[in-house]
Image (spheres, rainbow, N blue to C red):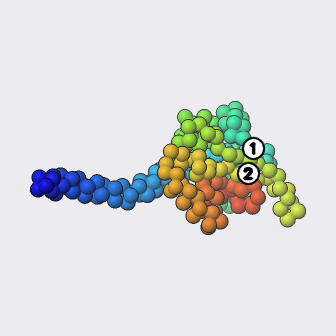
Amino acid sequence: MKTLNKVLTYLVLPAAILLLVYLIYQSVMQPVRFNNEVEKRGAVAIERLKNIRTLQEAYKTKTGRYLSTTDSLIDFYKNDSIVIVKQIGSMDDSLAVAQKRVTRENITIAVKDTLLKERAAFIDSLSFIPYSGGERIIMESVIRKVSGVDIPLFEATMPYDILLKGLDRQLIVNLKAEKEDMGRYPGYKVGDINNPNNNAGNWE
């Protein structure tokens, strides 16, 4: 009996304490690791949505409307062109303006040669939600009447359910519920097809 007590005292009890400490540590660290991963994935998501916004706004400047698919945006980037205004001289120089030495001219330039040049290598990933295993960004565009005027609108979204795939399910549910309680989209979103917001992102 004494031998059994010694075994319990010197082996089993310390092991149980270590296991308990480990389990407490894991329970504390799990949400910390989750939040760190959300922040990391969110940074990539935001960058991608900003790129979509840049191309959408360039396309709207050219055509007066937005595109409804990311494949069309990629095609616009790779194969289309935009007009930029080149100014020679400064409008602040009143003498030069009076002497008509300040001129402007329209120059047509390939989209890929002026927009997102530093991110060209990643343009083919524009359609996909990062960390999702290949699931696509959800994008829509519409023409909606606002105060009697037809306004082109678009939105692109990445729901938490897809962006955070593989992370703790209950923590994802909690995060979604928190955003929904605040009346916010449960994920990352740029633009809005129901409420014009000047193409703002919900992280801004």
Mark 1 and mark 2 lie on one chain; the one further toward the N terminus is 1
Residue flagged by tag 1: what amino acid is it?
Ser
Residue drawn at x 61%, y 57% is 186
Instruction: Identify the disc placed on residue 154.
Output: 2
Instruction: Identify the disc placed on residue 151.
Output: none
Residue drawn at x 62%, y 51% is 159
**106 or 31, which is in the foreground?**
31
Which quadrant holds residue 115?
top right
Q: Secondary structure at mark 2?
A: strand
Residue drawn at x 52%, y 51% is 169
The single residue placed furthest to the left in the displayed view is: 2
User: Residue 38: x, y in percent?
Assistant: 49, 53
The single residue placed furthest to the front in the displayed view is: 1
Residue flagged by tag 2: what amino acid is it?
Phe
Mark 1 crowdedness (10 Å alpha carbons): few <14, some 14-19, many ≥20? some
User: Which residue position holds label 1?
Assistant: 68
User: Residue 175: x, y in percent?
Assistant: 54, 59
Tag 1–tag 2 contact (CB < 8 Å): yes
Q: How many marks?
A: 2
**Compared with residue 66, is residue 76 higher up or lower down, i.e. above or below?**
above
Cα distance between the residues tagged 1 and 2? 7 Å
Residue drawn at x 76%, y 48% is 141
**191 or 115, which is in the foreground?**
191
Residue 85 in view (yes/no): no
The single residue placed furthest to the top in the displayed view is: 79
User: Residue 192: x, y in percent?
Assistant: 71, 56
Residue 158 in view (yes/no): yes
**188 or 181, which is in the foreground?**
181
Q: Secondary structure at mark 1?
A: loop
**32 or 1, which is in the foreground?**
1
